Structures are given as C-alpha cells and as structure tokens.
Amino acid sequence: MWLFVSIVNDNMGLKKYNDPGIPLEDVYPQAQELVEIVFRNGAQNVMVQPVAEVRTEAGRRFETYCKERLRGFFLVHNGNWGFPGSRPEGFSARAVHPPSAAFPVPDDAFIVSDHGSFIPQLTIDRSMAGEADPGLLEAWLIRMRHQGVPMVGYYAFQREVTDATAIRTIGKVLSGKVQ
C-alpha cells in the first residue's frame, strides 16, 4: 500500500472553494515544516506531490526546494494548473487533472479527478461535495484501467463525512469484480 501526500496547492490565495485568500508565498515556512514531517518519516511507499497545480513563482520555487530536500522520494509533478505536458527531471511521475471523464488523458501519467468541472460529474447530485455516483465512478475507473493509466485518484472534495460509496466502488474495481 502506498501513501500519496500532496503538500500544498498553488491555487492558494485565489479565494475559490472557501479558500481564505492566503497565497503560498505567505505560508512558505509552514509548507517547509510539512516537508520536514514527510522527510522524517521516510520515503518507503510514499509518493509526494510537492505542489498541486503549480502556477506561481512561489509554487515553482517550493517544488524545486522539495526536489532537493526529498531526494530519493517518489516525486509527482502537477504543473501547468494541473495539466503538465511532461515529467521534469527529478520527478518519478506527473499527475494530470482532466476536466471530464471523457477527456482524452495520457497513459503515462497519474490521473486525478481534481478539477472543478470534473468533480461534480462523478457525484450523485452533481455538486462539489456530493457522494460518488457508483455507476459513473466505476465506468471512469474501468476506462482508465483499460487505457493502462498507472494510477487513478478519485478526489472527494468538500466532504464532511467519508464517502463510503466511493470506497466500495473503488474496492470493487480494484478487486477485479468488474471488467
């Protein structure tokens, strides 16, 4: 089993999705403290995405800092607002946030449903905080598996309780009970 750690999101400061408007630059020392927590606990079975949706100079600088500090960790790049065109040197993988389940995604990247347009498409009530729609989530996961995507992440956003439906659906697909 692997742990996927995303340290900061470079959308900080945009005041979207209840963000209080504090940019990454203003919490840079706290972000470095988070890196130290990850570092102290070791690299075994840990994937680290230093910055989700890299878009600012502070995000690029923090990603460079993490690349040096977390040398030997499995590092994941998520630049260009969540759609990096390549995997930069020093990173083991790249993560892509497609805008929809039908969007053509690369088969060499981790695919994560972390996109403001995509999140509601996979929920029963079509909201950002909704419970997963098991049929839609299953179909998307199967499509990603058949395409050969190395890792798929379902992004349960603004949830106040665990999404048991999503967990059961993911487990069903992982167990091979569906093709």
Image: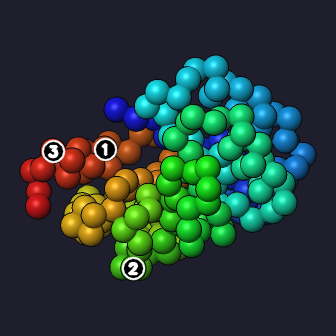
- Residue 36 image point, x, y percent: 71, 26
Q: What's the distance in space between the residues labelled 1 and 2, CA to CA?
A: 25 Å
| Residue at x 52%, y 41% (from the top left corner) | 74
Judged by depth in the image, the label closer to the viewer, 3 or 1, is 3
Q: Is residue 87 above or below residue 50?
A: below
Q: What's the distance in space between the residues labelled 3 and 1, CA to CA?
A: 12 Å
Furthest-right residue in this view? 26
Q: Please indicate whether residue 48 sits to the left or right of residue 3 in the image.
A: right
Instruction: Tell me the tag on residue 175.
Output: 3
Tell me the quarter of the image containing the C terminus.
Answer: bottom left
Q: Amino acid at mark 2?
A: Pro
Judged by depth in the image, the label closer to the viewer, 1 or 2, is 2
Residue 130 occupies quadrant: bottom left
Q: Please indicate whether residue 49 sits to the left or right of residue 25 in the image.
A: left
Residue at mark 1 = 167
First along the sequence among labels 2 and 3: 2
Q: Is residue 136 above or below residue 153?
A: below
Residue at mark 2 = 104
**Secondary structure at numbered mark 3:** loop
